[in-house]
């Protein structure tokens, strides 16, 4: 598990995070006010490293309610009767947590989310479920494992 920004930056040997743009201190404070229990690692990251698209086209952005995924065309397709008649219905009660916020994606049908009620972990929201599963123990570990795809 990575707990320090310096540890994370040491892993970014290919400068994949170099294309991100830092978020202003004022905007970070606004995010912290809107989402009082949001990951401190996430806030530190967007303030010092930034948001935008990495050199490998992974998107890190300011938080937005994860439930907005329900407006995405892919979500609507996966939840359609035609799709579900072939691939099955999602389990009863499989819902997006109310306090989940999307903070990243790779352009696919997954959104990466923080959910303060569930702790420091980063979760993968799969539009086909929508399943909501743990992706990493904390935000810095998520960036190391998923965004910069650390290689040994």
Image: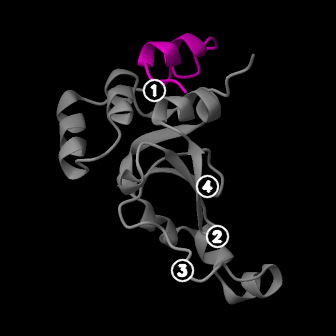
Vertical relation: 49 (above or below) 59: above
Q: Which residue in the protein does label 3 denote?
A: 93
Inspect this view and state whether residue 114 appears: yes
Q: Please tell me which residue is depicted at 30% across the width and 30% down the height of the picture.
A: 23
**Marks 1, 2: nearer the viewer:** 2
Q: Which residue in the protein does label 1 denote?
A: 20
Mark 3 or mark 1, which has the lower sequence index?
1
Q: Please tell me which residue is depicted at 60% across the width and 68% down the height of the picture.
A: 130
Q: Which residue in the protein does label 4 denote?
A: 110
Observer-nearest of 55 and 49: 49
* Real-space Cα separation, disc 2 to disc 3, in angstroms: 11 Å
Rendered location of residue 70, percent (x, y): 50, 71
Q: Which residue in the protein does label 2 denote?
A: 129
Observer-nearest of 73 and 116: 116
Mark 2 or mark 3, which has the lower sequence index?
3
Mark 4 or mark 2, which has the lower sequence index?
4
């Amino acid at each position: 598990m990575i707990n320090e920004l310096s540890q994370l930056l040491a892993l970014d040997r290919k400068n994949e995070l170099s294309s991100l743009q830092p978020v202003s201190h004022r905007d970070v404070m606004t995010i912290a006010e809107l989402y009082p229990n949001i990951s401190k690692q996430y806030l530190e990251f967007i303030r010092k490293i930034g948001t935008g698209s990495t050199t490998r086209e992974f998107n890190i952005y300011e938080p937005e309610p994860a439930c907005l995924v329900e407006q995405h065309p892919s979500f609507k397709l996966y939840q359609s009767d035609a799709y579900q008649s072939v691939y099955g219905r999602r389990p009863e009660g499989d819902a997006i947590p109310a306090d989940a916020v999307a903070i990243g994606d790779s352009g696919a049908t997954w959104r990466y989310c923080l959910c303060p009620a569930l702790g420091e972990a980063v979760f993968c929201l799969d539009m086909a479920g929508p399943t909501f599963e743990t992706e990493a123990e904390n935000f810095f570990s998520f960036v190391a494992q998923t965004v910069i795809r650390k290689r040994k």
